[in-house]
């Protein structure tokens, strides 16, 4: 499970670096509430 969280965090950081954030409405995958909570916990 830890490897999945690490990969997910890396992917989210990559999206942020590319400017693909929810604020820009250009994110390729919408994050639901559950996914956002999982990222904040790690």
Image: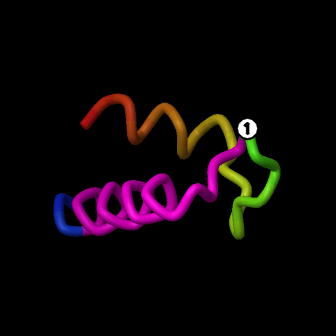
Which residue is found at the position 58% from the left and 56% from the top?
19
Question: Relative to residue 33, is residue 25 depicted above or below?
Answer: below
Q: Residue at the spot x=77%, y=59% of the render?
A: 26
At 48% from the left and 53% from the top, the residue drawn is 16
x%, y% of residue 9? 33, 55
Find residue 37 and report its horizontal and vertical position in percent.
48, 32
Query: Badge 1: how crowded within 10 Å, few (<14), some, or many (20+)?
Result: few
Q: Look at the image and tell me in which quarter the N terminus lies.
A: bottom left
Q: Is residue 7 magenta?
A: yes
Q: Locate residue 2 relative to residue 35 in the image: left or right.
A: left
Rendering coords of residue 10 (x, y %): 30, 63
Q: Farthest residue to the right: give it.
A: 25
Q: How many marks?
A: 1
- Secondary structure of the residue carrying tag 1 is helix
Q: Quadrant of the C terminus?
A: top left
Dominant SS in magenta: helix
Magenta-colored stretch includes residue 38: no
Residue that extends furthest to the left in the rendered view of this protein: 2
Here the colouring is: rainbow
Magenta-colored span: 4-22
Query: Considering depth in this image, is 18 or 13 the residue closer to the camera?
Result: 18
Percent x, y of residue 2: 17, 59
Whether residue 34 is situated above or below residue 20 in the rendered picture: above
Residue 20 placement: quadrant: bottom right
Q: Residue at x 82, y 50 (%)?
A: 25
Q: Is residue 25 left or right of residue 20?
A: right
The residue tagged 1 is 23
Q: Is residue 33 left or right of residue 12?
A: right
Quarter location, residue 29:
bottom right
Question: In the rendered image, which quarter is residue 8 located in?
Answer: bottom left
């Amino acid at each position: 499970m830890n490897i999945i969280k690490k990969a997910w965090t890396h992917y989210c950081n990559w999206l942020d670096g590319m400017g693909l954030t929810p604020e820009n409405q250009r994110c390729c995958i919408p994050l639901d509430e559950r996914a956002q909570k999982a990222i904040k916990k790690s």
